[in-house]
Amino acid sequence: QVQLVESGGGLVQAGGSLRLSCAASRKIVSFKAMAWYRQAPGQRRELVADISTGGSTNYAGSVKGRFTISTESAKNTVYLQMNSLHVEDTAIYYCYADLWSQTVWGRGTQVTVSS
C-alpha cells in the first residue's frame, strides 16, 4: 500500500508563495492521475489541480494562472507551486493518487494565508 505524505504548508501573507510537496512511500510505476485537493473550514473538499499520466493538467478556475502542478518521477513526488496566494486559499491541502487499482489520500497539510 502506497502512502502519501504532504509537506510545505505554513503561514504566508497574501501575495506570497508556497510550494507543497507530496512524497510517495515507494516508487509509483504508473498512475492514472495525481491531484491536489483542498478543504476549507465548513466547506466541501474541492479539486485544486490534477495531472494525468500523460502530463495533461487541469486546474480549478480560482487557481488557474497562479498554481502549477508537476511531478518528479525520480523522487516519487508531486508538487503544487502556489503563487499570488489569496486569503481564500486558506485550507488543508490533500494529495491524491489514482493508481489504477487503488486510490490513496495523504493526511493533508495546512496552508494559511493572512491579509
Image (cartoon, grey):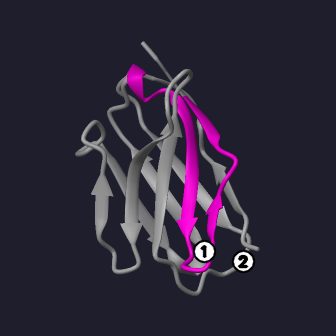
Q: Residue at x 48, y 65 (%)?
A: 34
Q: Marks 2 and 1: in contact by CB < 8 Å? A: no
- For the residue carrying disc 2, how many other residues have a C-alpha within 10 Å: few (<14), some (14-19), or many (20+)? few
User: In the rendered structure, does residue 109 fall within the stretch colored magenta?
Assistant: yes
Q: Residue at x 32, y 33 (%)?
A: 84
- The nearer-to-camera label among 1 and 2 is 2
Res 92 quadrant in image: top right
Q: Is residue 25 left or right of residue 49?
A: right
Q: Between 45 and 18, which is closer to the camera in this rendering?
A: 45
Q: CA distance from mark 1 to mark 2?
A: 9 Å
Q: Is residue 77 above or below residue 14?
A: below
* Quadrant of the snapshot with the N terminus: bottom right
| Residue 35: image tag | none
Dot placed on the residue nearer the N-terminal end, 1 or 2: 2
Judging from the image, what secondary structure is the residue with disc 2 in? loop
Q: Which residue is mark 1?
A: 75
User: In the rendered structure, does residue 34 fall within the stretch colored magenta?
Assistant: no
* Quadrant of the snapshot with the C terminus: top left
Q: Residue at x 51, y 78 (%)?
A: 31
Q: Residue at x 64, y 51 (%)?
A: 6
Judging from the image, what secondary structure is the residue with disc 1 in? helix
Q: Which residue is mark 2?
A: 26
Q: Which residues are magenta?
A: 87-111
Q: Is residue 2 above or below residue 86?
A: below
Amino acid of disc 2: Arg
Q: Is residue 25 above or below residue 11?
A: below
Q: Is residue 108 left or right of residue 86?
A: right
Amino acid of disc 1: Lys
